[in-house]
Image: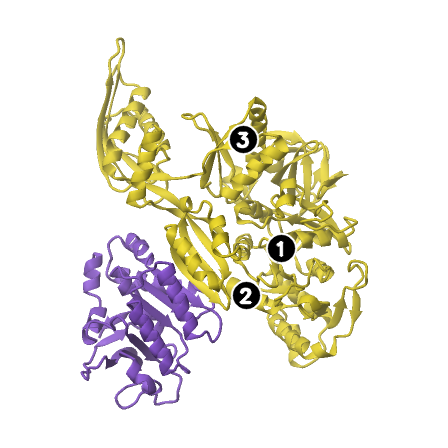
Amino acid sequence: MVKSELINRSPLRILEKSIQGGVGKGNIGVIASRKGVGKTACLVHIATDKLFRERHVIHVSFSKRTDHIISWYEDIFNEISKKRELVNAVEVHDEIIKNRVIMNFSQEGVEISQILKSLEAMIVSGNFKADSVVVDGFDFDNISDEDLDLIKDFAKDLDLEIWFSVSLKGEEPIFDEENFPVELKSIISKLDVVLTLKYDDQSIRMDVVKDHDSDMKEELHLMLDPKTLLIIEE
Amino acid sequence: MSLESKLRNIGISAHIDSGKTTLTERILFYCNKIHAIHEVRGKDGVGATMDSMELEKERGITIASAATNVEWKGTPINIIDTPGHVDFTVEVERALRVLDGAVLVLCSVGGVQSQSITVDRQLKRYNVPRLAFVNKCDRTGANPYKVKEQLKDKLGLNAVMMQVPIGLEDKHEGVVDLVSMKALYFDGGDDGISQVVKEIPADLVAEVEEKREELIDALSMFSDELAELFLEGEDLPEELIHEAVRKGTLAREFVPVFLGSAYKNKGVQPLLDAVNSYLPAPRDVDNIALDLDNNEEEIVLKSDPAAPTVALAFKLEDGQYGQLTYVRVYQGTMKKGDELYNVRTRKKFKIGRLIRMHADKTEDINEAGCGDIVALFGIDCSSGDTFCKTGLNYSMTSMYVPEPVISLAINPVDKKAADNMAKALNRFTKEDPTFRTYVDDESNQTIIQGMGELHLEVYIERMKREYKAEVETGMPQVAYRETISRMAPFDYTHKKQTGGSGQYGKVVGFMEPLKEGHYEFVNDIKGGKIPTEYIPACDKGFQASLKKGRLIGFPVVGVKVTINDGQSHSVDSSDMAFQSAAIGAFKQAYEKAAPEILEPIMKVTVEGPTEFQGNIFGSINQRRGVIVSSVEDGNYSSVEAEVPLSEMFGYSTTLRSLTQGKAEFTMEFLKHGKVPKGIQEELIKEFQAKK
């Protein structure tokens, strides 16, 4: 399969369709689940899909080392190219990773303002024309409305969309009757798209629980492949 | 105990400016090898003893690794002082090859910096067990615990504190030893020679208890006995703790962390005790040689003094009385007057003088046991040669030598300089396998090649100082490569009739990109269209074409050539004719094969205060660099990028001005990558203009 066909047949097209084409520039998307369900894999898959489409992505992380993150990307890319029998996989890989930057913050409790400052340095001074920023592992416990406004203004100013992964830590039930994460209810108005991941029997299901201002909540029929953690059709 | 069970061969590896040379100097001092302390940048103009070259004294860096022998509490220790700058990494690598253990020196403020990461990777490659020494604890901002955490996080080492500092920064007085549970002070007034042992200061008791528990907890993996006693709350015998630390260290599963300040004479003697207690003796390590008579089969060498001698020349230096060759004896004994065999040159030689080195002073000895590091005088050899007792044909595993990435044309200013330059180049190429030289047959200029700008600069300086060879230099030139990107056929007839017998040869086939390797030749001729005797001539013709590519005159790599048809003439065909035919065929197909230029891409790490992040990102972007990642840790950031070498000239100056001198960078060769179209055209234009 060549790259363009791979892009067209990606299950992420289904996701996009159900959230009105995507999170959108100046907006915030969130993937929420319990720890260890597959948020990072999802974010990396979403980012890799952008890279395939020649977009520029900044991956923000808060781990001790960056090589783990790089190997996430390597794994997801290899799984996709193997599954789709991608033509010229090595060349495509070398071409797309040029458009990815990993920014890692290893200090504890780093402020939103500092993260945005560093992102701006990369985008403006470093002339890295990011289309999307994916933020993995940021602690949402103490995030305020003002912080979220700051992030949205930043996203608007620099014309990019931002994805966050959010680890749900509260007691069961962590989702309300509408399947919305209880912990995120207080900031619901600031989030544009919210996806959830949860175990459903043996598989991990992906649901859209907020889609911009729309009330439509179609079944997504997407899940994570339990072996590769790729997003696949049910 | 025999010599080899007590001997230690250790290296001291570190990031530049971590105080490695100062530490070495103090070790020599405490081992009574020198009588006074000098600094690297000595105010007294004498300079540290290990920095034997003038240039190193001037720049405050150590370039060549001098081996020196000391003795600490009855244990002989050979110390190799290794260079800290990445441009001299091959020197570090060679030193590591002959070491059994290493002390990784870290700055208590700077912590694990990019160079420490490179050095650590090398230590891992050669399976060298190590101790860590957190130096400069007297500096403002000193934090040995943070450094220990970095050893864990950044290098993935199981690093555990062996000591607790008594005061830090300007209040740094000494250390608490977590094994003996005693406080050690070094303020006896005699440059720290006499250690003062006291009880643990009251305000440190809680911290010491906590760290001791961490230590014992980590060690229980290596000693069941210790784990049991610990669980039962019994007293732990010191000997048992030492044994466990040694076991973990030798297995490279544990890195004991010591601390102090070499400059302030604190913590050096306990570190020496640790070298004796925890680092391996030569016989604790398996060394492998390749048996050249037996298909390079791996042989484990015996640390038996009676076994046939095997030794490795790992370092050459110009001594007062001619070439000095540093060797490590791996098996058997080396005696004055013995006859040895150089496996590479297949020549026998006799050992005239055998010497033990102390930095710049020498001591004549009669024999060296196995595991020992000594020097020979007047032996003609290159660095990396293996010497065996006649009859053996072993080679020590070949040392990894990277390809040079940069070259520079040099012109001697006069006749005398030319003679001296030849001598110097001959010496340098023998000393350093990454430094190469050749005469370009078109421009007739002498070209030197190496691993980076600084690498070549240092040799030019040495030529001037040590050999009085003044040279003018051209612009540094990147080592480009050419390659092809698609299949292209050829059908070429070489025909010449110049009276008498002519020349005739016809070759038909195709060339295509080769994914791995430089060149492959496939003979697919059926029915003797080209007689077998001329096939090697075809191969030779193609290989000759690879030497200078047709785009910009750099070597062509990644080409597979297949010949499948051709024609010969019973009278006019010859080796010559077919070689010319192949050259013609290559020319014919090369342009159709969409040739491309490849350039060396360097892995560049820039470290500096976070406030300058934007400038650093910008400077990389301007250099066609791709930022792979950035890591922020409080006020300190490190950026990793891939940048073409051709864009890195003068980067140190730019970086200095962009960051008020507060950022630094290291780089090493990563891969060859395609040059962008526009630049390819420019390079071709330049090449055409020069022609």
Residue B185: image x %, image y %? 76, 67
Could you tell me the amino acid type at mark 2?
Gln
A136 sits left or right of B242 in the view: left
Mark pair 3, 1: CA separation:
38 Å
- Mark with earlier residue (2, 1): 1
Q: In the image, are marks 2 and 1 on the same chain?
A: yes
Q: Nearer the viewer, residue B21 or B530?
A: B21
Q: Name the chain letter of the residue that bears numbered label 3.
A: B
Which label sits in the foreground, 2 or 3? 3
Q: Residue at x 33, y 44 (%)?
A: B675
Q: Nearer the viewer, residue B315 or B472?
A: B472
Q: Which residue is mark 2?
A: B150
- Asked which secondary structure carries label 3, the reply is strand
Q: Which residue is mark 1?
A: B102
Could you tell me the amino acid type at mark 3?
Val
- Mark with earlier residue (2, 3): 2
Which label sits in the foreground, 3 or 1? 3
Q: In the current view of this chain or complex, which residue is farthest to the top?
A: B500
Which chain, by letter, is purple?
A
- Asked which secondary structure carries label 1, the reply is strand
- Mark with earlier residue (3, 1): 1
Residue B95: image x %, image y %? 60, 47
